[in-house]
Image (tube, helix red, strand yellow):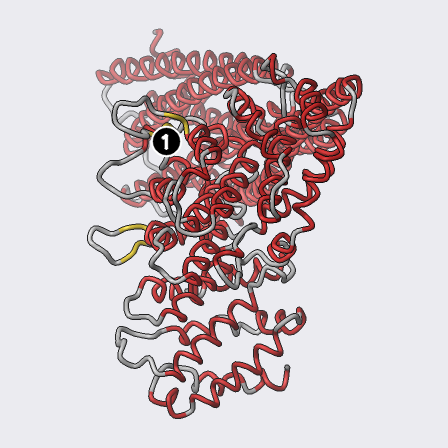
Amino acid sequence: MINFIYHFSNFQHYIHFSSLCIILGIVVEDCLLLLQNLLKYNNSNQNFFKEGSYIQRMKPWFEVGDDNSGWSAQKVTNLHLMLQLVRVLVSPINPPGATSSCQKSMFQCGLLQQLCIILMATGVPADILTETINTVSEVIRGSQVNQDYFASVNAPSNPPRPAIVVLLMSMVNERQPFVLRCAVLYCFQCFLYKNQKGQGEIVSTLLPSTIDATSLSAGQLLCGGLFSTDSLSNWCAAVALAHALLENSTQKEQLLRVQLATSIGNPPVSLLQQCTNILSQGDKINRRGSKVQTRVGLLMLLCTWLTNCPIAVTHFLHNADNVPFLTGQISENLGEEEQLVQGLCALLLGICIYYNDNSLENTTREKLKQLIEKRIGKENFTEKLGFITKHEYYSKAAQKPQPIFSSPDHMMFDHEFTKLIKELEVAITKAIYKSSEEDKKEEEVKKSLEQHDNIISHYKNVIREQDIQLEELKQSVAALQIKTEQNQTTISQQQAQIQQHKDQYNLLKVQLGKDSQHHNAHNSNAQMNGFQAEEVIRLKDEIEELRKQHESLRGELSEKDALIENLKQTQVDSQTAQQADVSEQAAGHKKELEALRSQLQVQSTEINRLQAERTELLQNIESKTSFTGSGDHIVSTSTNPELEEKVVTLLQEITVLKGELKTASEENSSLKQQLDTAKSTSAILQDEKVKLQQDVAESKKEQDDLLVLLADQDQKILELKKKLKELGHPVEDEDDDLESGDAGDEDYEDEVDDDDDDDDEAGREGDV
């Protein structure tokens, strides 16, 4: 296999439907036969073929084009072998996992779409069309994605019709070849296999509210075939409708709503009642084909319908003629073919006993068993029931899911129905021989088991929900860990920037003191007054910014209070072990958060210290301004009151601003206390998560504000240096400032002392 696949890429060039395909047709045929023999019943080779991505290379094989004149015998043979090769990969006898994987690959690479194009094409030979239908059937069997795609395929007609409807038209048409009708039935069965969505769509076309009189639906075609005079159409339609109900109690109950208009002037009858009417009057209706085939098909439909559906059993038993008909059929002595009908009648009556909910007084489980014992006999009943599994038609149908029959007369049993018989035969036999007390005990056990299953299902759902919540919390904690690490990195960077700005600030402060020594009196007075006004404006801006922070903190506090109340109302108890695990992680993050808060507190203290230094510098400037104003003999005495008024006004404004600053600080302290109180009430895990997110956001905002404040300070310092240069005072570099910083400080202090003495003398002169 491996050596053959090694040359597989060269093999591709011979398989395209081109002129080479005709010339090398026999070579292609031999290669396909060899490949089939290597893959059939060999799981390892099939896995190698699939994993080697050779399924994707099969799509060009089926690009037949629109030219229908080139269907030579060799081309038909090769395409037939290619379709069989696809079926080998998705055969129902393969392991389910391998089959589903191949089905998925065929849909993804477009192979299924290409097969549907051939299926809906015109001029395709009958044997190729039949094999294509069988191939599509096994590609979509049990695959929800492929089944949904097949349901969306439309035939190229005007108006467009679904491919399922077109295929069902061929199935119920007695003029179509028998093999083609069997292939369509198999396709319909595979479409509904483990497809509750498709089952619901088929049954919905029979319901009164969804019937469209202007278009032909699948349900109408099935009903037409079910009540046709062709026995093969009866059987195919009955089996197809049974597959729409298989293992689907909801659709079995929905089908009870279907009403049929039998003739003009007569009231409508239910589909269930019409099936029993045809079953009881089967000998009186002229049909083409075997009458036994029609009755077998209807009995299979009724058995499938009533299985595991007590409501349908009640509807069936509500007709008083049904039970006498079944007992009469079972008790008669008939030929071999009729014995098959007797066995199915026994199966149907056994289903009515086994799934009876005793809602009808005259047809309870116990009364039906008594009726069997009187009219038929338990031994005779079980003998008739066992005749089904002994029949050769049953053995042939049980071998493969695909309906393969040599002639229409041999078409009696469906593969899925043979599984149903195998499950019900033993259960019905036990139910017939059980006493009423055993039935009661069994019902009690069933009820207790159902309750137990419901409780288990409930707890499974609860555990599933808690697992989902726990996973979400774990993800949230992991995200918070990442954010915390990022914030720590950001804080470290900001601390370095703050230290850098502190150094720059100290240098500028020293430089400003040195420049003030060499400033003349008049220019110094004007500049300091302007600088003082700028400081007042800056303080106003800082107070406004603190007010904004105050409002922001108040809004955050109200949001936290609302979140706390909301989480208190929506709190759900989780498992103790899960809480402990998540609480430990939350405690770790809480410690990290406290560390972040302490770092922020240090930064806040540093900001306050910087503000105090600015205030001290401002006071020094004010004192110097007073000195120069009183000691300068060039300025006339008439301007001193004006300067004093300006100074007093500025001092009053500064005092008011300081009071507002103090009030804002007190309000901020109060808000911080309220935040600490709100934080103490947040003990729940989800509240801790929200608190961490908000605290991290607050930390980031405060850091951003600090950066903005430092940037403004740096800008103001640069502006002051620029003004000093404009006034003609030299501004030394930072390196010179560092060397002369100490000396400048001493000179500045001496000058301030002298200014104070002169100020005192000027004051005494003013008093005189």
The residue drawn where x is 27% and y is 76% is 68
Instruction: Please tell me whether residue 573 is drawn above or below residue 160 in the rendered image.
Output: above
**Spot occupied by residue 447 in the image (x, y as percentages of width and height):** 71, 20
One can see residue 733 in this view:
no
The image quarter containing residue 642 is: top left
The residue closer to the viewer here, 21 or 77, is 77
626 on left or right of 605: left
**Spot occupied by residue 472 in the image (x, y as percentages of width and height):** 60, 35
Q: Dividing the image into 4 quarters, which one contains the N terminus? A: bottom right
- In the picture of the structure, the residue carrying the numbered disc 1 is 207
**Spot occupied by residue 185 in the image (x, y as percentages of width and height):** 45, 53
The residue lying furthest to the top in this view is: 768
- How many numbered marks have been drawn onto this rendered protein structure? 1
Q: Dividing the image into 4 quarters, which one contains the C terminus? A: top left
The image quarter containing residue 80 is: bottom left
The residue drawn where x is 46% and y is 16% is 554
What residue type is disc 1 on? Leu
The residue lying furthest to the bottom in this view is: 23
The residue closer to the viewer here, 665 or 109, is 109
The residue drawn where x is 52% and y is 18% is 563
**Spot occupied by residue 725 in the image (x, y as percentages of width and height):** 31, 45
Q: Secondary structure at mark 1?
A: loop
Instruction: Please tell me whether residue 608 is drawn above or below residue 1 in the rendered image.
Output: above
Dot 1 surroundings within 10 Å: few (below 14), some, or many (20 or more)? Answer: some
